[in-house]
Image: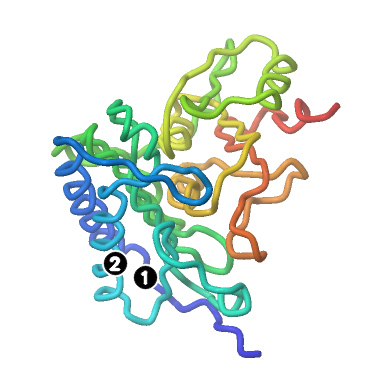
Amino acid sequence: MLTMRPMNIDTEKLLPRIREIAREAGQAIMEVYNRDFDVEYKDDKSPLTEADLASHRYIEKALRSLTPDLPILSEESGVPDYAERRNWGDYWLVDPLDGTKEFIKRNGEFTVNIALISNHEPVLGVVNAPARALEYFGSQTGGAFKAVADAAPESISVSTEHTGSARVVGSRSHRGRSLDAYLEKLGDYEILPMGSSLKFCLVADGTADIYPRLGPTNEWDTAAAHAVLAAAGGEVVQPDGHPLRYNAKEPLLNPYFLAIGDTCRNWLSYLRP
């Protein structure tokens, strides 16, 4: 079986256009956000709105025009069999509206996520929060940045010198016993509640030290913000200490993971019985 090797892609050349695509998809989302809309439910009981679909259609069309040879895997597209996917060297991984529950609640904590995956790693990521006029983006070669409204992007990096209580990002919509048990072992901590992939971004810009995700996520939920965090000097690891990888198995469900900014502390030790 032929396996496609990763291409020599210039991520810095692609990044400005991917930022534009995410921003324009965000505008399509806001057109729905600012009026009444219906909510449907998928087979897995997760919500779906016309904003999810409008963003998906725009991104898919724009990426196909930009890079016609690269496969696109989006939450709102059909998922190819692994027999086909396993041959992908590079591909786009997209969540056209991450945080649909936050969108429905109208709290502004939802994002457009676009990532480029190469050899199972996210090498470019754009996270756009249109209701907040907020954007995070980064790449393996160019570092990580945060942009607010029309201001010039500012370079960001993880915090490695924080003292005091651990700053832990937690989900607004998902909380479970596994996380509670982890926090009990952590000692003094402060919870920073946040929705969608913005949780990763708070670690990337140094606002938080760690985001422990001890519950289910899919690969499109994490890839773009994972790329930003990695570009900012952080890491995302599984409970066994190995890096979180993409398109390395049949199911697209991620294992539990820790998104870490301050690598001076052994965050994995608190997972042990």
Q: Nearer the viewer, residue 167 or 61?
A: 61
Query: Residue 120: x and y, percent?
Result: 58, 64
Image quadrant in which you'd find residue 5: bottom right
Nearer to the camera, 174 or 111: 174
Number of marks in picture: 2
Disc 1/disc 2 C-alpha distance (Å): 5 Å
Image x and y of residue 67, in percent:
32, 76
Q: Identify the element where label 2 is drawn.
A: helix
- The kind of residue tagged 2 is Lys
Residue 178 lies, with reference to residue 122, above or below; the image says: above
Q: Position of residue 64 (x, y in %)?
A: 30, 74
Asked whether 234 or 41 is in front, the reply is 41
Task: Identify residue for label 2.
Answer: 13
Say above or below: 181 vs 19: above
Q: Residue at x 49, y 52 (%)?
A: 223
Residue labelled with disc 1: 10
> Left or right of 4: which side holds 74?
left
Please identify the quarter of the rendering in which residue 212 is found.
Answer: top right
Q: Give left or right: position of 116 versus 215.
A: left
Q: Which residue is drawn at 58% across and 10% down?
A: 164
| Helix, strand or loop at mark 1 | loop
